[in-house]
Amino acid sequence: DARSRDDLRCPIVVIMGHVDTGKTKLLDKIRKTNVQDNEAGGITQQIGATYFEKKTLETQTARLNETEKVELTVPGMLVIDTPGHESFTNLRSRGSSLCDVAILVVDLMHGLEQQTIESLTMLRKRGVPFVVALNKVDRCYAWKTCKDSPIRDALKEQEEGTISEFRSRSTNAKVQLQEQGVNSNLYWEMGDEDWTNSDFIPLVPTSAITGEGVQDILLLLCQIAQRKIWKQLMWCANLQCTVLEVKAIDGLGMTVDILVVNGYLREGDKAVFCTLDGPVVTEIRGLLTPPPSREMRVKADYIHHKEVKGALGVKVIGNNLEKVMAGTSVLVVGPNDEEEDIKAEVMSDLTNLEDKLSTDKQGVLVQASTLGALEALLQFLRVETKPPIPVSAIGIGTIHKRDVTKISIMNEKGHPEYATILAFDVGVEREAREHAQEMNVRIMTADIIYHLFDQFTRFMGELTE
Ligand code: GDP
Ligand code: MG
């Protein structure tokens, strides 16, 4: 095993939090600070992710690092930016979490919200270290903009009234986190002992609009990577990768976007994917990424690779990829491997969940974006919901007409209330919607688990009235 502290892969970072807290804006800001400097290099757009070279991280944090003096040893950073990636934190790649570290975004003006708490629970359950961004700090009364500057420099420029509002709001967030069993502190007020305490969460005030605190977030993420999770970041030749998304692309057919965490993936590899109908073995015909620092418009713009090395995001072309499930692992059959063993290993993501994925005779259809999200949703509906909501069928990905047909059977079985699809973070085809109308099937959609539950219980309440 050639793993060493001198050969770290880049940490995979995910941004989570309640809707409207500024996740997208913050991601944009992190990506564009560089572009504004008109320095095109150093950031490359990948499939579902943005890669920051080490030298970019160094430039980005230079001002803050004049005082912090952190030596960067990570080779860069991979920030996941797949739409709807909030639910990807729940992805699992053979037992471990897909992301190495997370930014949990809280709106400083609102404090903790429902989905913040959901994300918090998920991150802690998976043991993913994270920082909390107290975003929208610029909304504090009479805030003086200090564009892109380290947060402490910006705070020094503020009047007393602004500081006191900031203090009271951040203390409030701290208390709310404490109520969730989380110890936290403004990160510069953390002692060395807090760093070694795995349950201690650093708070970073940020503005995703004017950029205060963005340097701090980047440097803090690097520090967490280097001080807390470097062991997990030691690059390893064993292939480890996870499906991010499955989608049809004009001219390419069905493609699978994957995140290669460790190891190499090569054109011509015999890859094994997991589907609800069993393993799919297919030859990798193409490995694509977008061109450097350019928005991808036409397919000719993709760069073809013979080989890619983790960690990175890449689009895979091959046959029979239609039913591949987001959130499952991908493996390659090597020269010394038995294909059957590899198939079994790929399917273990599913078989390990068999109990949880087993279905009731009568119940609703539950459809989610990824296997991890499906698992979380089923756990919620069956274990945490009182009384439990029975589930007769499950699925991953967009809702098609055939899904509507499948669950409409509940009308004939004398359980019209279960002729319902609970759809978490997935799209619904127009045909499916029309069909649902005809067949008396309800489709409830949400991207927050609790909202689905609320909709369904409200509906059940109306029935019994
Ligand atoms: P998301 O739903 O978490 O991705 O939130 P968005 O990034 O879409 O932001 C939601 C709204 O908040 C938008 O109107 C943003 O312009 C605004 N917003 C986000 N971050 C900030 C911030 O730091 N300061 C201010 N004043 N507004 C922000
Ligand atoms: Mg967003």
Image (cartoon, rainbow, N blue to C red):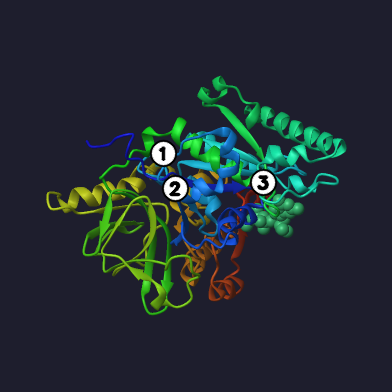
Report x, y in % for residue 175.
72, 29
Report x, y in % for residue 318.
29, 68
Report x, y in % for residue 238.
26, 45
Q: Which residue matches tag 3?
A: 149
Q: Which residue matches tag 2?
A: 54
Mark 3: few/some/many CA within 10 Å (<14, 14-19, 20+): many
Q: CA distance from mark 1 to mark 2?
A: 8 Å
Look at the picture and state if 93 lies above or below 244.
Answer: above
The amino acid pointed to by label 3 is: Ser
Report if the CB atoms under discs 1 and 2 are less than 8 Å apart. no
Q: Secondary structure at mark 3?
A: loop
Q: Quadrant of ligand 2?
A: bottom right
Report the residue that reaches farthest toward the front. 66
Residue nearer the viewer, 140 or 278 = 140
Q: Secondary structure at mark 1?
A: loop
The amino acid pointed to by label 1 is: Thr
The amino acid pointed to by label 2 is: Lys
